Each structure stands twice: as structure tokens, then as C-alpha cells.
Image (cartoon, helix red, strand yellow):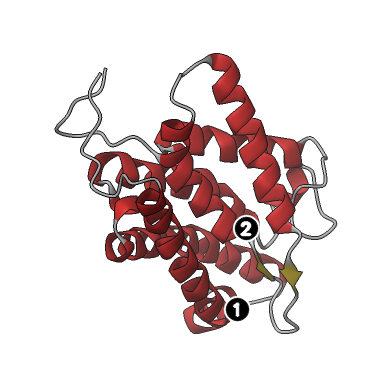
Amino acid sequence: MTTAASVYTPLVQTLIPRPSRVRDALLILGGSLFVAVLAQVRIPLPFTPVPITGQTFAVLLVGAGFGARLGFLTLLLYLLEGILGLPVFTGSGSGLSHLAGPTGGYLLAFPLAAGLMGWLVQQLGVDRHAGKMAVAMLACTVLIYLIGATWLGVWLNQNVGPTSLMEVLQKGVFPFWVGDLIKMGLTALLLPVTWRWLGREKSTPEQD
């Protein structure tokens, strides 16, 4: 049961309004493959084991478009696919050992970030407004960096040697901000524009 005071319907669930297990399963599978495809958009950097990828864009777009539950489950499936050996992660790595590598924290943060993005959409309707969407994406990106850089610091200390906080930030956060700001801008515009195109930018919370 949803309530008029608290729940907005995410975009994909508005476009495909009849909930069913088949619909949800297809969305989760399709979303995981979308993230896998953008994970292959990869720019390695010589000074860090963390590459620039299209994953963050895909993760937050899935969370915003699908909502909290489906977004979270989509990224859980994505992780499971990689753990089982499917080539869905960035680069050639796969399997459980990949999660123990330098980028493992970022991967583990993806379901949480997608879930948070979906929650902000459903509770606050942030995807209807570019400014609110940008702030929501910033919050979710910070969550990814917090978990990802923390694990990267642990990995560097164990595998490279003593690493300061500033070195961790230089390897795991600072090089990616410009690209992530561009991704945030694209997503912050994409969903509000889509709502306007549908003629529902002033959509009120859905009622059951």
C-alpha cells in the first residue's frame, strides 16, 4: 500500500504500470545488463588501480528510474553475476576475488547507492526537478566514494604499503570528480526532461 503523503512512482514503473513478478524480473535483469555494458566504458589511469568507468552513471540512473527496491535488487543481481564469473565488471576481472581487489568497495556500495537514489525519488520526487536531482545524485555519489575509498585505503595498506588519507583521496576520489559532475548533470537533466515530455512534471504522489 502506498500513501499520497509519501510515495512518488518512479519513471519506469510509471511507463510499465502493472506490477508483476515477470515485469520486475525483466527490469532487474535488463538493468543489471545495462550496468554491465556501461562498466565496459573504461579509462585506466596510470597512478591508481581505480579506472574511470560509466558504472556510477548507470547505477544512479537505474536507482532513480526503478525505485528503491528494484534498484537495490538490480545491483545485487549485477554483483551476483560478477561473483559467478560473468564478465560484467570493469576490465577482465570477475569472481568473488574481484570484490577483494581495490575496487571492491565501490562495487559493494552500488546496491546501497541505487537503493538510496530510488528512495529519494519515491519519497521526495527528486527526479521531477533538476536541482533536487543533482543534490540527490551528489549524496549517492558521496556514499559510493565513502565506502569505495575506505576499502581502497585498506587494500593499499595491505598490498602496497602505508598509505595516508590524502593518498587514498588522490587515488580513489579526486581524479573522478569532474567526470562524475558531468554524469550528475546529464542524469539531473534527463529524468526531469523525460517527465516534462510525458506531461507529468507536476505529478503528485500516487495513490493506491
Which label was assigned to residue 195? none
Which label was assigned to residue 171? 1
Say which label, 1 or 2, has the lower sequence index. 2
Q: Is residue 112 visible?
A: no
Amino acid type of disc 1? Lys
> Total marks drawn?
2
List x then y, in percent, for residue 59. 55, 51
Residue drawn 64% across the image and 63% down it: 54
List x then y, in percent, for residue 15. 46, 34
List x then y, in percent, for residue 169. 51, 78
Q: Quadrant of the C terminus?
A: top left
Q: Would residue 124 appear left or right of 56 to someone viewing this image?
A: left
Whether 47 is drawn above or below 135: the answer is below
Labels 1 and 2 touching (C-beta < 8 A): no
Q: Mark 2 sits on what residue? A: 55
Q: Nearer the viewer, residue 48 or 33?
A: 33
Classify mark 2: helix, strand or loop. helix
Residue drawn 57% across the image and 81% down it: 175
Q: Is residue 131 visible?
A: yes
List x then y, in percent, for residue 49. 71, 72
Residue drawn 19% across the image and 25% down it: 3
Residue drawn 62% across the image and 70% down it: 157
Distance between mark 1 and mark 2 Cα atoms: 17 Å
Classify mark 1: helix, strand or loop. helix
Q: Quadrant of the N terminus?
A: top left
